[in-house]
Image (tube, rainbow, N blue to C red):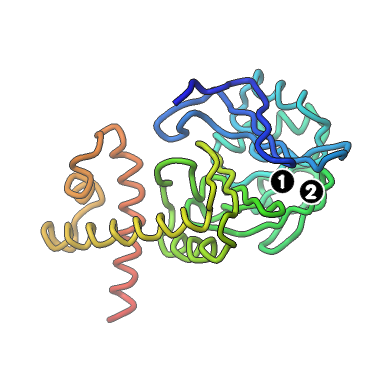
Amino acid sequence: MSAPAYGVLRRVTETASVLLENNPSSMTLEGTNSWVLRAPGAAGAVVVDPGYEDVEHLTLLAAAAPVELIVLTHHHPDHAEGAPWFAERVGAPIRAFDQALCRGAEAFGDGEVLKAGGLEIGVLHTPGHTDDSVSLRIGDDVLTGDTILGRGTTVLHDLGDYLRTLRKLIELPAGTLGLPGHGPELPDLAATAREYLAHREQRLDQVRSALRELGAAATARQVVEVVYADVDQALWVPAEWSVQAQLDYLRSEDAGNE
């Protein structure tokens, strides 16, 4: 794999370019993808997920195009922390699913169409990673935030929500290009969503098996030590968050069946 191109605006499609923030980690992969969306010939652009309050990155992002609108896919700081600074710098409003993140504009809802940068951008509420996670549909492409990553799997807040989100994304046309918040583009987002769903069902089976071995009252950490025994322990903390979401899901299912 070639070295990440930090500080270079890379054109991905006719309407989408990406600026990679220099914040690599086990959670952010090569770093946060800040997306610049603009129709050919449009005067202004939409910036999605400016990232951390990283002045060097945000200054480069501000220079990429006149900014009409800033959109956040969710509230995590590697996507949203720098948005207020950036909004002040470029003089643009911020919109998000959560009104608390917005500046100079209202929150948007599922199914809303944003008109900016010469584009019509459809909002898909895709909770699971967080309650306020959204994906954005631009023509035949979908920007996924952290709902589906370019590589690996995402950490979950609510598994039930996430399974419903995956089933929604599976219904997208074959060949829909996925533009993730971290990692490389996905050539067929619906196919990736099917793979994610199969992976989640496999993990659920593994958690069920671990609970049979450990007992129904086992903690997320105890389950991680069984299910993720062959995984680098540096990843056990985020794995524990996802396992907790799976335990909550399984226990709510059991309660509903009583």
Other-residue count near label 2 (Cα within 10 Å), few / some / many at <14 / 14–19 / ≥20: some
The kind of residue on which mark 1 rests is Cys
Quarter location, residue 12: top right
Q: Classify the position of the N terminus by image quarter.
A: top left
Q: Quadrant of the C terminus?
A: bottom left
Which quarter of the figure has residue 16?
A: top right
Q: Residue at x 64, y 29 (%)?
A: 19
Q: Secondary structure at mark 1?
A: loop
Residue furthest out toward the left: 213
Residue 172 or residue 204, whichever sits in front: 172
Q: Which residue bears the numbered disc 1?
A: 102
Depth order, front residue of 233/151: 151
Q: Are marks 1 and 2 in contact (CB under 8 Å)?
A: yes
- Which residue: 65% across, 22% down? 8
User: Does dot 2 land on a helix, a strand or a loop?
Assistant: loop
Q: Nearer the viewer, residue 117 or 57?
A: 117
Q: How far from the left and from the top, in percent, is residue 27?
A: 43, 35
Of all residues, the one furthest to the top in this rendering is 56
What percent of the width, then of the height, locates residue 46? 76, 40
Quadrant in which residue 195 is drawn:
bottom left
| Along the line of sight, the residue nearer the viewer: 106 or 116 | 116
Crowd tier of the residue under label 1, counting other residues whose Cα lies within 10 Å: few below 14, some 14–19, many 20 or above: many
Residue under the point 19% across and 60% down: 217
Say whether residue 6 is left or right of residue 156. right
Say which mark, if any, is on residue 123.
Answer: none
Amino acid type assigned to the residue bearing label 2 in the image:
Ala
Query: Which residue lies under the disc numbered 2?
Result: 105
Q: Position of residue 170 (x, y in %)?
A: 51, 63
Q: Quick check: 221 left or right of 16?
A: left
